[in-house]
Image (cartoon, helix red, strand yellow):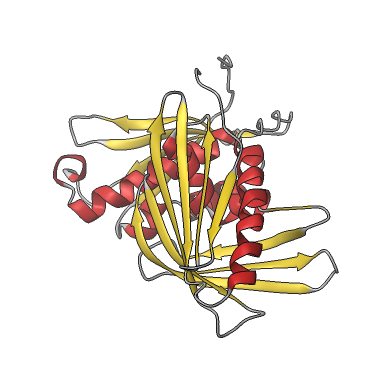
Amino acid sequence: MSGSASAARAIADVTTGTILASVDIMVPPERVFAALSDGAEIARWWGAPGFYTTDKWTTDFRVGGKWRADGTGADGKPFFVEGQFLEISPPWRIVQTWEPGWSPDVKTTIAYQLSAIEGGTHLVLRHSGFDGQAESCEGHAEGWVHVLGWLVAGIVKKPEPATDHSLYFLARLLGPRPTFMQDMTDSERQVMMAHGAYWRGQQEKGKMLIFGPVGGPQGGWGMGILRVDSETELAELQASDPAILGNPGMYYENLPMLRAIYRDL
């Protein structure tokens, strides 16, 4: 992949109470979008020893849905931050509120804007709402430099190699109607874009080997080859799929593979 990444940077405008931060990441926008929307993945990369750790990130990823991060500070004390999703446009934009548990009267807004560049993604973050809070604005700007650095490090991390105990499944994603691929609504199409971003994220982790739509005489369906450690993990991955969460009537049919012979590219 061509191009080179730029270091994360942030500027705090204390007169307007706004932070602007940006970073270039040498992976596609869909991959970055997944890293910013998948709660399990966010918990993996957001934090570092000596700063704080994110122990759990729960999310209802839809406009109006809530999210919450629970973590442990460098002093060993627990903390939480929560908010609500205001705008979601896969794979380009996420807008959400930021409501820290340690300052219950403070409510700011974060907007992630992604754009494609040669070889990757340019991410611009706008954090607004720090009116009259100059010190907090400057502190959060410094914090965002660390967070975007963790994002870059986490997003390019190579998946763990498969163990001898890995299980392989051919998964069929079946739609609510045979003509779903031809006549999906705009809202259904947005959900399916988030579905694609989600499974690209699982590809980076080595869980999804290959996936895509398949045509057929009785209608199309989605196909995926997954490598998991257990059937429980398979069920959890599929239960978190935006296609299952956002399109009533969609479901998975899983077929265990007796042997899996493939070549890493």
**Residue 40's image quarter?**
bottom right
Q: Is residue 232 visible?
A: no
The answer to whether residue 83 is above or below residue 49 is: below
In this view, the residue in front, 211 or 123, is 123
Residue sitting at the far bottom: 105
* Residue in the image at 60% along x and 58% along y: 141
Q: Is residue 28 visible?
A: yes
The answer to whether residue 223 is above or below residue 69 is: above
Residue sitting at the far front: 15
Numbered disc total: 0
* Residue in the image at 50% along x and 21% along y: 3
The answer to whether residue 111 is above or below residue 167 is: below
In this view, the residue in front, 235 or 146, is 146
Q: Position of residue 200 (x, y in %)?
A: 47, 37
Q: Position of residue 192 (x, y in %)?
A: 32, 46
* Residue in the image at 36% along x and 51% along y: 243
Q: Position of residue 75 (x, y in %)?
A: 85, 69
* Residue in the image at 62% along x and 33% along y: 156
Q: Position of residue 128 (x, y in %)?
A: 46, 66
In this view, the residue in front, 175 or 59, is 59
**Apparent side of residue 218 relative to residue 37 in the rendered image (left or right):** left
In this view, the residue in front, 39 or 22, is 22
Q: Quadrant of the C terminus?
A: top right
**Apparent side of residue 52 relative to residue 200 in the rendered image (left or right):** right
